[in-house]
Amino acid sequence: MLSKYFSYEEMIRSQTATRYGIDNTAGEGEVLFLEILCRSILDPVREQFGIPFSPSSGYRCKELNEKIGSKPTSQHVLGQAADIEIPGIANAQLAWWIRSHLDFDQLILEYYKVGDPRSGWVHVSTKGSSDSEGGGNRREVFTYNGAAYTKGLPG
């Protein structure tokens, strides 16, 4: 287990990696960041809402990240990011709670459509507590509607 609620296996699981035979094993450094992500972001979210969930995307090796068309600078490659949804909780509500209660690097309400609370998902990342990797958390917040990023969250 990486933390109280999240396992290494669920943080590296990928249907795309399985489909294409990509080895999505995380290295030691990435595992350390996954532990920080799980303990500082995902565990508090789980405790707040009391509903089990598993990230739809956690760690991505470079090959997997490229295969899905993500940017090479994605924090998923470092083990610093996860994409999450919680059954029965609106994604905007989840994003607002994280914004108000946790220390994060980036928070993006992705593919969100106004008026559809179940649309999209929440991308959240953390650099951890160390300044050795380029500074602390930036607390950047965006909403992405599939075409453009806007600063902040809806509502």
Image: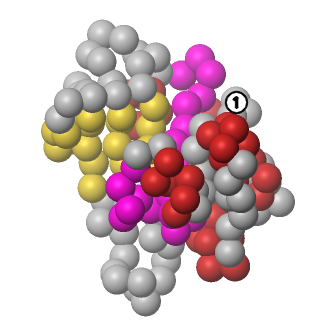
- Residue 55 visible in this rendered orientation of the protein: no
Is 81 in the magenta? yes
Q: Residue at x 72, y 49 (%)?
A: 21
Q: Residue at x 46, y 17 (%)?
A: 118
**What is the count of numbered marks?**
1
Residue furthest to the right in view is 1
Q: Amino acid at mark 1?
A: Ile
**Residue bearing the label numbered 1:** 51
Give the main secondary structure, helix, strand or loop, of the magenta stretch. loop
Q: Is residue 85 left or right of residue 19?
A: left
Nearer to the camera, 55 or 91: 55
Q: Is residue 124 above or below residue 91?
A: below
Q: Is residue 49 left or right of residue 155?
A: right
Nearer to the camera, 68 or 51: 68
Judging from the image, the colouring scheme is secondary structure
Q: Which residues are magenta?
A: 70-89
Relative image position of residue 147 (x, y in whole percent): 20, 30
Q: Residue at x 27, y 29 (%)?
A: 146
Q: Residue at x 26, y 36 (%)?
A: 143
Q: Is residue 153 above or below residue 137?
A: above
- Residue 146 visible in this rendered orientation of the protein: yes
